[in-house]
Image (tube, helix red, strand yellow):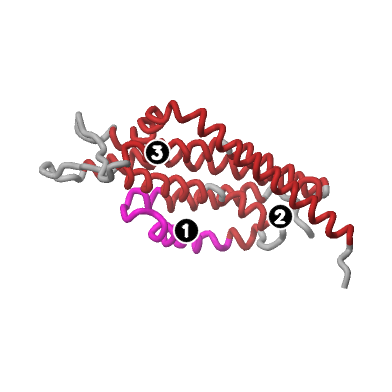
Amino acid sequence: MNDNPSTIDTLSKNLIELRKRLIFSLLGIILITLGLLPFCRDIYQIIANPLMTYLPQGSQLIAIDVVAPFFVPVKFTLAVAFFLSMPNTIYQIWQFIAPGLYNKEKLLIFGTMISSFILFAFGVMFCYFTVLPMLFKFITGFKMADIAMMTDIDNYLNFILKLFLIFGIAFETPVIIFILVKLNVLTIQQLTKARKYFFVGAFVIAAIVTPPDVISQITFALSLYALYELGIIFSRLIPQRD
């Protein structure tokens, strides 16, 4: 059976366009990384500050691996570059999918992409400025006087990146709820009735995805529930069908 030439031609154009957008996205990450590399030590200091603030005067993070003093600041920089390049990545994704969308679909998807990025950024900032200081203050406050905290920088990086990702994803809750209501998968009435179950579920999720400390678990659970309520508020803006 012969393949339809027009179908093959369309598929070929789509693949070429996809490759183009992937290259542009990767170039954005590379260029921002190169621009940030001269400031990798400053970025490291900013990321380490939430912990260093509550350590005794003169304390330092340690490196167990020989190459860690070089690679960990670079990893920090790569993580920051990836985050800062997200607007370009979102733009490239949009340029790829927009031609095949109707106007109403464009408005919904573009709004969803932008709001998702903004909420993720708020989640990361909330974690950095609120959760981490509370967490480290709690931990250092309960530390015994004869115990010296010597934190490995690689473990510290993995720890906070995990928290950034967890809180960033959690802050997507309003967008997810909005989409589910928009697509008529759920109704506001169902979401309202499920409040008490979600409240309990938020603490269960927190116990699973966050580190085993009461501060981050409670903060995550309460934040997740607050975002659930925010999603319901946003969903009320959607015209309801009779």
The quarter of the picture where residue 141 lies is top left
Out of 189 and 74, give the one closest to the viewer. 74
The quarter of the picture where residue 147 lies is top left
Would residue 33 appear left or right of 10 to someone viewing this image?
Answer: left
Q: Is residue 197 magenta?
A: yes
State which mark lies toward you, 2 or 1. 2
Residue under the image location 62 percent in, 54 percent down: 177
Q: Which residues are magenta?
A: 193-219
- Residue 42 seen in the figure: yes
Q: Position of residue 192 (x, y in %)?
A: 59, 58
Q: Which mark is residue 130?
A: 3
- Mark 1 nearby-residue class (10 Å; few <14, some 14–19, many ≥20): some
Disc 2 from disc 1: Cα separation: 23 Å
- Which mark is first along the chain, 2 or 3? 3
Residue under the image location 38 percent in, 51 percent down: 218
- Amino acid type, callout 3: Thr
Would residue 157 appear left or right of 198 to someone viewing this image?
Answer: left
